[in-house]
Image (spheres, rainbow, N blue to C red):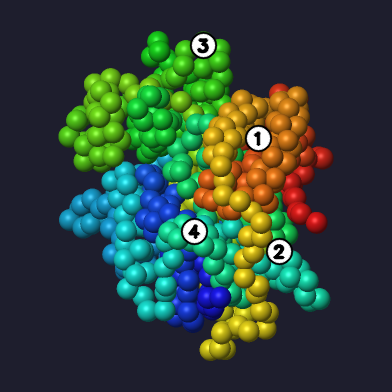
Amino acid sequence: MRQFDFIVIGTGIAGLSVAIKAAAHGSVAILTKRLNADSNTNWAQGGVACVTANDDTIDRHVADTLDAGAGLCREDVVRAIVAEGPERIAELIDIGVKFDQVEVDGRLEFDLGREGGHSRRRVLHSADHTGREISVKLLAAAVATPGIEFFENHYVIDLITTAKLGFVTEDRAIGLYALNQTNGEVETFRSDRIALCTGGCGRVYQYTTNPEVATGDGVAMAWRAGATVANMEFIQFHPTCLYHPKKKSFLITEALRGEGARLIDREGREFVNDIDPRGALAPRDIVARAIDNQIKRTGHPCVYLDVSHKDRAYLEERFPTVYHACMEVGIDPASEPIPVVPAAHYQCGGVRTDINGASSLRGLYAVGEVACTGLHGANRLASNSLLEGAVIAHRAVEHMRLKFPVNGRPPTEFPLPPWQSGDAQDVDELVVIYHNWDEIRRLMWDYVSIVRTRKRLLRAAARLHNLKREVHEFYWNFKVTTEMLELRNLVQTAALIVECASLRHESRGLHYTRDYPLPDHEHGPADTLVRRY
């Protein structure tokens, strides 16, 4: 059994930030199911929304966030995160993160971008690969920090709680089991302070902008441990994913629209203007629904993003990732429109936490996309996610340090039993796992995507119920594998999305249902909460 003062699961901005700050107070283990550089953060193109300009204010950023969140944001959480953002940005700069700058009147200022839902330019960026810049610098800082031990290729199977072990005490998280994918052994980790920083669940859907690691692991394991999960119906679909068979998961950053890119149909008409006066810069829920409606109404498989008003040199310098990705598949964005479609992008619900990242299960914290703090409400404002990860990571460590002080001795109060495989056999039918994986993603896209109905949700729930039973049998009858664990988390996360969507009898933000097309301000639930009893 490995013992640490802190355990962090995930190596994005949330996980690395927690680990670096926690290392000042004790030993830290960072577990990640792939390599350290594999995270949703690493894929982020747009940037970090933060008040830095003279013509911007905290109140304006708060107001934009509340407006995008469609009435479900917790204003105290929004205000705290926005207000503390500049200090966390300064810390990122201190470790070497470089945000683009521009010379104004002989002095350098941040070259701020603008994205949908923002009333001001406030998005700090590093060209169009901001996430990669942050990931590289944070990872370097974490590697150089004494007291942090990395465990790559360690897939966390489940959290260990006192209730699961039968202790008569307040239920709390005290450790976890993780599959070492290098040797196939299951290892036991012990700690009183566990931070879930596992990112989101985009791979639940057939079409997504997310990397392969985004299978809803954190939400699924937290739910199985007894933590409260909230608002999983609010899955954000990014309006502009490249429509091309060779790059099915490539995001076309919203910052292009902030620089004047036009969202048009095949006749060249800016159709979003018919729905919202902000047009292509309306919040993502509005734009994604407009595109979905346009595609279904016309039968054309995509719409287009036209940035040809910008010259080639500008596109290569400001948007090198997008420019070169398009050129690789024969699309020249300097002279022709880019075909785009919506795709699953961001999980706005998740493990229910307070402003400090503390979940309903003692000792378990959730930071970043895996968490539901109340910042995003029913729809995330563009580029608020990296800001949330940095701010809540800082708060979580401070909260852990004060609530569960490290006394310099390893935890010994609760002995953890080693993993037992029993009579489980090696998996002999991986094709069944792959088939179930594909079926889940297809049914979620067909029945639980941008536009929903009660009938579709019922069909999805019925099929997921059967799939959960099949996966449960696989889990208990065979030795655990990466493919099996991902499938287990995928089906559980999908079921939670459907359950939350079924509980909300209104349309709000990212949840749109034809059965209840309007928001219910009188009877609609503030949050949809689910917990395993």
Tell me the mark number nearer the camera, choosing from 2 and 4: 4
Q: At numbered mark 4, what does the secondary structure look like: helix, strand or loop?
A: loop
According to the picture, the residue beneath numbered tag 2 turns out to be 360
Q: What element does badge 3 sit on?
A: loop
Numbered label attached to residue 96: none
Which residue was labeled with disc 1? Answer: 511
Residue type of the residue flagged with mark 3: Gly
Residue 157, located in which quarter of the rendered image? Answer: bottom right
Q: Mark 3 points at which residue?
A: 299
Q: Do the residues labelled 1 and 4 touch (CB within 8 Å)?
A: no
- What's the distance in space between the residues labelled 1 and 3, CA to CA? 23 Å
Q: Look at the numbered discs 1 and 2 and tell me whether their residues touch, using CB distance below 8 Å.
A: no
Give the Cα separation between the discs numbered 2 and 4.
32 Å
Question: Residue 516, relative to residue 74: is it above or below?
Answer: above
Q: From the image, state whether disc 1 or disc 2 is nearer to you.
A: 2
Which residue is the site of mark 4?
Answer: 184
Residue 480: x %, y % from top left: 58, 53
Q: Which amino acid does label 4 sit on?
A: Gly
